[in-house]
Image (tube, helix red, strand yellow):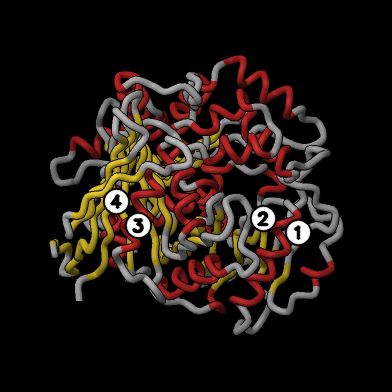
Amino acid sequence: MNVTTIAQVPIAVIGYVTAVTDPDSDCVNIEVEPYGDFASVCELPDRTEQSVAALAVRTALSVVDTSGLRVGAVWASSTSGSDHYLNVISRLGASRKRSIAASGPVSGANGILAYLATEHAMTGPCLSIFGPFHDHHVWFAHQYLRSSTTDIMLSGYSYSTESQIVAAVSVLAVSE
Amino acid sequence: MLFGDAIEASRIPGIGHDSDYRAYALACEAQGDRYLFESLLQEALGPIRNRIVAADEDVERNRPVVLLSTVMGSRPDHDRSDPISAAEGVRAALDSDTAAVATFLGGHVDVIGIGSGCAAGTTVIGLAQSLVSSGRADMVICLGAEVLSYEVLTLFLALGGLSDDDMVRPFDADRRGMMPGEGFGVVVVEPPEFAKAPLASIAGYGEACDGWNLVAPSPTATGISIAITDALASASITVDDVGWICAHGTGTRANDALEASAYDRIFSARHDRVPVVSIKGTTGHCQGAAGVIETVVAVTSLREGVVPPNKTISTLESGIEKLAHVQVPCSAVPLADNNYVLSTSFGFGGSVAAVVIGAP
């Protein structure tokens, strides 16, 4: 178990997952720490940043028992946006063209986070970050744990390019 | 305890019967969203630019941080349904609104973008408290900014949440929905040793999530309860110390009754009825900027000793009127010297933020 100490409050990284799309197939390669497990998932509903992020978080939470615990998340995305707003608006009948801009980088991280929060019924703080200093997601996750407002924090980021979609998430908790 | 040492007024275009929002939003689109948004940023930060630079050049102080809260920002022009190249991705990151802020301020700041939906404006106030109290920053500029957006108009029209007569009537029996607003708010947060003329203090903060539905509030309002309880506890105050609640109050059928009922439950131990006010009847819903703007209103209220009115109520919804622990004033009422203001914001995806603002 990796432990870092911030202001006398030891924070433990109790799980770490990376999910990276395979450029040569429709699969997503997943690596799980601290177990070193590796898996390839090929049944994703679509190849979007949101789906890859959801897969990473689902995998991370599958190795941690969060029953009865308050879970929150900080998510950062600096490039592609999610399809959350796009899907919502499209489902409601608005034109796709008009809705495209709403899935840009500003709402992107929150779109992903909204999807994750809903899927996992989160009640802890849920913060989305964008911009060059999005690495602060780790710092903010630590701060939420330090302030004792939540039991588990997910600290994650995602980005997508033409050839690849990447999501990584750490599961953090105050070390006993 | 932290101090807001400089607070700039917000620029809000008027809404109401005379405004033609749809035409305005389309005109904005034609003019170019990036130009408009960057103009707004410059208008917001221009008056305090020299002060930020001076803080950065002070060797005794840590580097200033700007927390930019926005829902839509300037939005990219390219079609997101097409894959983008790595180069385009990098360019999008560097060409972002946070980079625009950093460029305008000559690289004298770190800029962190916060996009937690319409809760973002209150969230940045809480994050500023965290950054300053931890010693990470000695000056945090909370900048909430939002320009009118045809996409948001489309979204709320599709959701059935848009007012059909351009009027926003939070808590009114005849409320017909929200109207997006445009504007900015700026709150500068500094530790006591650097705040020369503090206007107010951030006394407490709470944050939670109602991970229940992507676009609808949770009927149990669990997140609201957690955020407010945490905010009051971190401020070390009771429900009786709250002078009024600056409510999220969007004017939609779904939000207002649920929100008022949540306050009624949370403040059930109170000895009188807590005043609940939404300023969105005047400003519209400035989304990512709303929480910062409402913090400015909270500070102004404390300084002037007045609880602002709900200006657009004709007939208070009967269910809200019957609540035992909540009142919804239609005219300004005095605010006691030792009172605090609780300000709340909610966002799509379930984010809930609550901040307690007190005297310096």
Tag 3 and tag 2 share a subunit: yes
Chain containing the residue with disc 1: B
First in sequence: mark 1 vs mark 2: 1
Q: Residue flagged by tag 2: what amino acid is it?
A: Gly
SS for dot 1 = loop
Chain containing the residue with disc 2: B
- Residue that carries the numbered disc 2 in the rendered image: B249
Spatial CA distance of label 3 from label 1 is 31 Å
Answer yes or no: do the residues labelled 3 and 4 have beta carbons within 8 Å? no
Chain containing the residue with disc 3: B
- Residue that carries the numbered disc 3 in the rendered image: B129
> Mark 1, residues whose alpha carbon is within 10 Å: few (<14), some, or many (≥20)?
many
- Residue that carries the numbered disc 1 in the rendered image: B171
Query: Which callout, 3 or 1, points to the residue nearer the camera?
Result: 1
Residue B109's quadrant in the figure? top left
Answer yes or no: do the residues labelled 1 and 2 have beta carbons within 8 Å? yes
- Residue that carries the numbered disc 4 in the rendered image: A169
